[in-house]
Amino acid sequence: MTEPEAGYTPARAQVIEAKWQHRWRESRIFHADNPTGALAGPKAAREAEFVLDMFPYPSGSGLHVGHPLGFIATDVYARYQRSEGKNVLYTMGFDAFGLPAEQFAVQTGIHPGVATRDNIERYRRQLERLGMSHDERRSLATTEPSYYKWTQWVFLQLYGSWFDPEVNRARAIATLIPRLRARLAEAGLDWDNVGRARQEELLGEYRLAYRKESEVN
């Protein structure tokens, strides 16, 4: 194998990449500023741009080639927006994916919570080594209780509400019961005697979070 004329070898590439990735970290060039608070800074006065990738599932021992295939394109877009003078919030998160993590736990005896945290740290190191321009301060994982407690809260608000067109807003599901009671009475039925399953079926027709059979691509 002949040496490249410019002397650009894999070892040389490692040195150059490590140098500039270190410079990026030290200069915090990829950090996006908030107008106020702990993350406040002068870039907040610029036009804002939000760039977000699909979160990878940290259920494997590392990134696969399909991950950077998409991430690199998004990174190029984020860098371009910065070159246009924008305050770009580009970050990365990690999604929850139950079955692979659970299966890995069965095979290895490692608790899925431990394995997931370890995999996330490995993914972060690999993303940094790829040179992704994420603002690492804003990274999150949907497996963190501080995150999913709010998704669960939002779901419960939706599940416990229905949209009332007469007032043009959502209302508590309990306020719908008198209407359903009257609807059943017109059919000669008593709300209190139709059974819990039928009551839930009727309420489910109006809940903002509901279950429905549908085609999936």
Image (cartoon, rainbow, N blue to C red):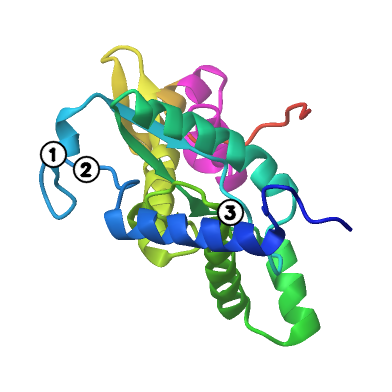
**From where the camera sits, is residue 93 visible?**
yes
Residue 68 x/y as whole percent: 65, 46
Checking the image for residue 42, the label placed there is 1
| Crowdedness near tag 3: few (<14), some (14–19) or many (≥20) residues, C-alpha within 10 Å | some
Q: Nearer the viewer, mark 3 or mark 2?
A: 3
Q: Is residue 135 left or right of residue 75?
A: left
Secondary structure category for the residue under label 2 = loop
Dot 2 and dot 1 residues touching (CB under 8 Å): yes
Residue type, label 3: Leu
State the residue lying farthest toward the left: 36
The boundaries of the magenta stretch are 183-208
Q: Circle 2 is placed at which residue position?
A: 33
- Counting residues from the start of the chain, the first of labels 2 and 1 encountered is 2
State the residue lying farthest toward the front: 5
Front in this rendered view, residue 125 or 156: 125
| Crowdedness near tag 2: few (<14), some (14–19) or many (≥20) residues, C-alpha within 10 Å | many
Secondary structure category for the residue under label 1 = helix
The part of the image, by quadrant, that contains residue 96 is bottom right
Quadrant location of the N terminus in the rendered image: bottom right
Q: Nearer the viewer, mark 2 or mark 1?
A: 1
Front in this rendered view, residue 23 or 30: 23
Q: Circle 3 is placed at which residue position?
A: 130
Q: Is residue 66 magenta?
A: no
Dot 3 and dot 2 residues touching (CB under 8 Å): no
| Crowdedness near tag 1: few (<14), some (14–19) or many (≥20) residues, C-alpha within 10 Å | few
Marks 3 and 1, how far apart in space?
28 Å
Dot 3 and dot 1 residues touching (CB under 8 Å): no
Residue 91 x/y as whole percent: 42, 46
Residue located 17% across and 35% down the image: 44
Main SS class of the magenta portion in the image: helix
Residue 78 x/y as whole percent: 44, 33
Residue 117 x/y as whole percent: 53, 73
